[in-house]
């Protein structure tokens, strides 16, 4: 399984990348799970490490060794954590991976500093790769562009709050907010492997996978099992998050908008209307469409049989995961 194969390598690379001193070290290591607010050791690296795992997988599947690609993988995970720290501030989320979010632990000002430092550290880390200079320049360009696209997605997400965001507008937002970094992951792998001729198709592949991943998150955010997700049924509705099911339902029934503006009062009615409109089924269908799109694009890459088997296993995991 891709997520298990590379995790130890990535964890060590992140440990090394965040070997800093003083308060700065605590601020960048806390969101990763490597430190507590008082500087003592944290519970360990959290999250699925999907993005950095895909960097190493893409590299190895194209004939490269994963070790030289580790700085690129670590850099991408640092960018991802930068976005999470800032997103938690903007969304007011008090917990991340079962711990107080950075702004709850350190205050908003210091959490902004933590996010800024993670981004700067990401760009520095990518430059430490033991690869040709042209590969490192290409990686910096990919990381910078993907970060800008991700930020643009967050801008679109915030701008859509309280509005009847349609399916196309949702997909445009999600392709940037989630798809950009997953596309970057596959593309960074092609660069590390010395096969940049496959960069463009890899970007597209990752974007499709990112859309599927985000739509699955949307499904879990409304109908997920609270014992698995750690969140109540309808948690994304309570946060007034614009997800695929909500965007689909609003296109069918704009009259939902007033209910969605006060979800704590109308949760049962919102869930009933989403069910009647077929929002859950439509989201599953769109997710499957994007997974098939990713699988089709993967056929354009000269991966060996082991890589195709592991990628198929990953697609199944992403479709069936419950948290």
Image: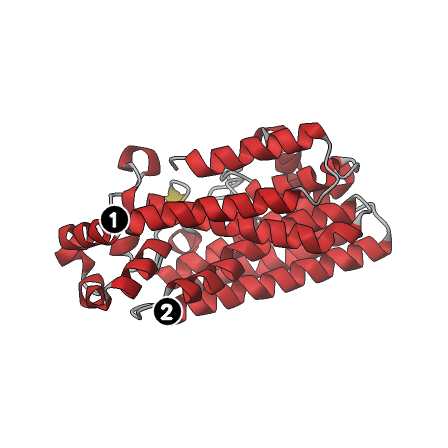
Residue at the spot 48% in from the left edge and 47% down from the top edge: 289
42 lies left or right of 145:
left
| Residue that carries the numbered disc 2 in the rendered image | 160
161 lies left or right of 2:
left
Q: Is residue 151 above or below residue 85?
A: below
Q: Is residue 312 above or below residue 162?
A: above
- Please state the horizontal and vertical placement of residue 220, each as a whole percent of the image: 34, 43
User: How many numbered marks does the figure carry?
Assistant: 2
Mark 1 Cα shell of 10 Å, populated few (<14), some (14-19), many (≥20): many
Q: CA distance from mark 1 to mark 2?
A: 19 Å
Under circle 2, the secondary element is loop
- Please state the horizontal and vertical placement of residue 75, each as a whole percent of the image: 65, 50
Quarter of the figure with residue 16:
top right
Q: Residue furthest right?
A: 132
- Please state the horizontal and vertical placement of residue 118, each as a whole percent of the image: 59, 55
- Please state the horizontal and vertical placement of residue 129, each as a whole percent of the image: 78, 47
| Residue that carries the numbered disc 1 in the rendered image | 234
Image quadrant containing the N terminus: top right
Colour convention of the picture: secondary structure
Image quadrant containing the C terminus: top left
119 lies left or right of 136:
left
Residue at the spot 31% in from the left edge and 47% down from the top edge: 280
68 lies left or right of 185:
right
Quarter of the figure with residue 15:
top right
């Amino acid at each position: 399984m891709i997520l298990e194969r590379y995790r130890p390598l990535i964890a060590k690379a992140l440990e090394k990348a965040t070997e800093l001193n003083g308060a700065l070290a605590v601020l960048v290591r806390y969101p990763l799970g490597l430190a507590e607010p008082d500087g003592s050791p944290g519970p360990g690296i959290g999250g699925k490490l999907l993005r950095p795992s895909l960097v190493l997988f893409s590299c190895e599947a194209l004939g490269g060794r994963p070790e030289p690609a580790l700085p690129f993988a670590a850099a991408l995970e640092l960018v991802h954590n930068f976005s999470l720290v800032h997103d938690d501030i903007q969304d007011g989320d008090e917990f991340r991976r079962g711990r107080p979010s950075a702004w709850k632990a350190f205050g908003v000002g210091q959490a902004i500093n933590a996010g800024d430092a993670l981004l700067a550290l990401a760009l520095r880390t990518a430059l430490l790769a033991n690869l040709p200079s042209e590969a490192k320049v290409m990686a910096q360009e990919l990381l910078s562009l993907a970060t800008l696209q991700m930020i643009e997605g967050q801008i679109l997400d915030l701008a859509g709050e309280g509005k009847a965001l349609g399916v196309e507008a949702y997909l445009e937002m999600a392709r940037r907010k989630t798809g950009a970094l997953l596309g970057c992951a596959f593309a960074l792998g092609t660069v590390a492997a010395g096969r940049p001729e496959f960069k463009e198709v890899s970007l597209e592949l990752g974007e499709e996978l990112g859309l599927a991943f985000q739509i699955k998150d949307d499904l879990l955010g409304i109908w997920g099992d609270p014992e698995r997700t750690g969140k109540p049924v309808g948690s994304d509705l309570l946060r007034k998050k614009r997800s695929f099911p909500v965007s689909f339902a609003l296109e069918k029934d704009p009259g939902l908008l007033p209910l969605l503006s006060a979800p704590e009062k109308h949760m049962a009615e919102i869930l009933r209307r989403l069910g009647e409109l077929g929002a859950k089924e439509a989201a599953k269908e769109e997710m499957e469409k994007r997974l098939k799109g990713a699988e089709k694009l993967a056929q354009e890459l000269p991966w060996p049989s082991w890589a195709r088997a592991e990628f198929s296993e990953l697609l199944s995991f992403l479709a069936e995961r419950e948290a």
